[in-house]
Image (tube, rainbow, N blue to C red):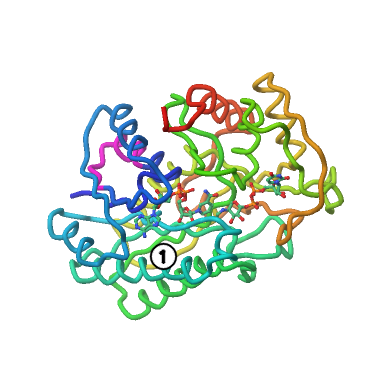
Amino acid sequence: MSILVTGGAGYIGSHTCLELLNAGYEIVVIDNLSNSKLESLNRVSELAKTDFKFYSIDLLNKKALETVFSENNIEAVIHFAGLKSVNESIETPLHYYHNNVTSTLNLCQTMGKYGVKKMIFSSSANVYGETKCVPVTEEHPLNPINPYGRTKLIIETILRDLYISDHSWSIALLRYFNPVGAHESGRIGEDPNDIPNNLMPYITQVAIGKRDKLKVFGNDYDTHDGTGVRDYIHVVDLAKGHLKALEMVIPTTGIDVFNLGTGVGYSVLDLIKGYENTTSQKIPYIFTHRRPGDIDKCYADTTKATKKLGWTATKNLEDMCYDSWKWQKNNPNGYNE
Ligand code: NAD
Ligand code: WQD
């Protein structure tokens, strides 16, 4: 029996594939490589010292998807595939709704047809929208403020309705906070196609000299130093959370939702200082205006994941900064050697 990983060539997917292989799971990977490179999977294979099947297909192509289910004995699906840029989703909402929602419908229909009813879905802290109180529990009101976040909430709703209609499904909705860092080997990591939107990859590109300086978006937030506070989580901790979720989903039925974060909030300035101290690289920065749509602080209450999944993040800010830097330093052009 295999675990099907959609979007497995991507940032979080590749790290999770490696953890799955290291734990002895057999995997099958689907990715259309729209935001990733095949090289990430070559390196996963190299690190795990084992091979696995890869299908370069689009989840929107239902016929191709059926082939994967007919050719393999799939036990459960970890569904990472999706588009994830908030800005892009505002510019091209239909593309985002089509890619994220339609592909999930195709996936669920095909899973149902082949009797595969166990799924882990990559949701996001983005579904909470403006945080009313921190730390954020899973019960916090859901009010995403951009099309990307709304695709995630729509998919969560679809999966809940699916479970209501058929109680033999078993589904974990995982709401990630801010994934950063890279595998300790420095062989796999985050490889943004363009100018990074997110803070950590931007900082690493400043550190390596690809960008002059970081623009800190706002220093008048209601936080300890005026800059935005987030819950950064090491991608390997996050990947391990999926293995815990799998252990819950496989032997049971039901649907449940979990925050995956560290529970600790760091500001932009904390991250810059942490990066400088850990890597001895200077990160020049300037303060600019707030980025539209940003909130002052967001960090997770992770009690539920600890209690029900037996999972807690173990890596600290130093690990996150060090591993991001190691990946960037060893791969200045990402997977384009
Ligand atoms: P990523 O872009 O690196 O990985 C997503 C992968 O899905 C890519 O390899 C892409 O090529 C593939 N893909 C996209 N649409 C596809 C389709 N129609 N068919 C087949 N493959 C397709 O992103 P990531 O950071 O690894 O994120 C993985 C998941 O986690 C996404 O669903 C994302 O929305 C969610 N998430 C990410 C973050 C984050 O900050 N990275 C935070 C919360 C949630
Ligand atoms: C973090 C902090 C910025 C860049 C996004 C998505 C979220 C999830 C994770 C997918 C904020 C500040 C940033 C820069 C800066 N992804 N910043 N200068 O916005 O918390 O979350 O990624 O699900 O859904 O919205 O992450 O890394 O973009 O920003 O000052 O160049 O860094 O203002 O305070 P964010 P981020």
What is the magenta range? 17-28
Looking at this rendering, what residue extends furthest in the left direction?
71
Q: How many marks?
A: 1
Task: Tell me which amino acid carries mark 1.
Answer: Asn
Q: Is residue 111 above or below residue 312?
A: below
Residue 54 magenta-highlighted: no
Q: Is residue 159 left or right of residue 57?
A: right
Q: Is residue 95 above or below residue 217?
A: below
**Element at label 1:** helix
Who's the residue at 64% across and 68% down the image?
Answer: 145
- The quadrant of the rendering that contains the C terminus is top left
Q: Position of residue 226 (x, y in %)?
A: 84, 47
Look at mark 1 in the image and give the residue it sits on.
99
Q: Is residue 73 above or below residue 131?
A: above
Q: Is residue 246 left or right of residue 280?
A: left
Q: Position of residue 257 (x, y in %)?
A: 49, 62
